[in-house]
Image (tube, rainbow, N blue to C red):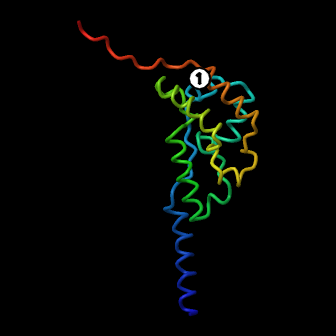
Amino acid sequence: MRTAIRLVLIALLVVLVADRFVGPARTNPVSDPAQRLEAVSAPPEAVQATLRRACYDCHSHDTRWPGYAKVPPVSWFVISHVNDGRQELNFSTWGAYALDRRSRKLTEICEMVEAGTMPLRPYVLMHDEARLAPGDVQAICAWTRSQPVMPAATAPAPHE
């Protein structure tokens, strides 16, 4: 029994050490300031502050990496979520999005915060400051609805 426990502890130590050298990277890539949400869509200060505290850790290149994001296997989970979040919506590269994608994302932002599906519950449990009050949700949705919307694609006129 002692041998099995020692083997498990050695294996765990090897994983922890190996993760420091070959584990997934915790990155905050440099982004073009002209492409950032603030430069392109200029949300009101209150909305910017709410997005920063509730969304930017997963949806921008301004991620604050907490200590637990350095400990495997938790780090793998956190890094994966951040990478997925940035892939889905990245406020640091907002200006590079096509207008139809921006329009779609604005609609999705409001829908998700109204439904309470964003920010993710596990994130809010670990980061109480990310919890959105009803006023936060209303302000975010008012901002998303105030943005220019792409017209729906129209079908070509039939040939006569």
| Front-most of residues 117 and 38 | 117
Q: Element under label 1?
A: helix
Q: Residue at (27%, 11%) from the top-left corner?
A: 158
Q: Quadrant of residue 91?
A: top right
Looking at the picture, which amino acid does disc 1 mark?
Val
Locate the C terminus and report the quarter of the image it occupies. top left
How many numbered marks appear?
A: 1
| Front-most of residues 122 and 160 | 160
Q: Is residue 125 above or below residue 110?
A: below
Q: Residue 10, image x and y in percent?
A: 55, 81
Locate the N terminus and report the quarter of the image it occupies. bottom right
Q: Is residue 147 above or below residue 16?
A: above
Residue pushed farthest front? 160
Q: Is residue 2 above or below residue 29?
A: below
Residue pushed farthest left? 160
The residue that disc 1 covers is: 40
Q: Residue at (49%, 19%) from the top-left corner?
A: 150
| Front-most of residues 49 and 17 | 49
Q: Residue 15, image x and y in percent?
A: 53, 71
Q: Residue 6, image x and y in percent?
A: 57, 87
Q: Quadrant of residue 17?
A: bottom right
- How packed mark 1 is, by other alpha carbons closer than 10 Å (few <14, some 14-19, many 20 or more), is some
Q: Residue 117, image x and y in percent?
A: 61, 44
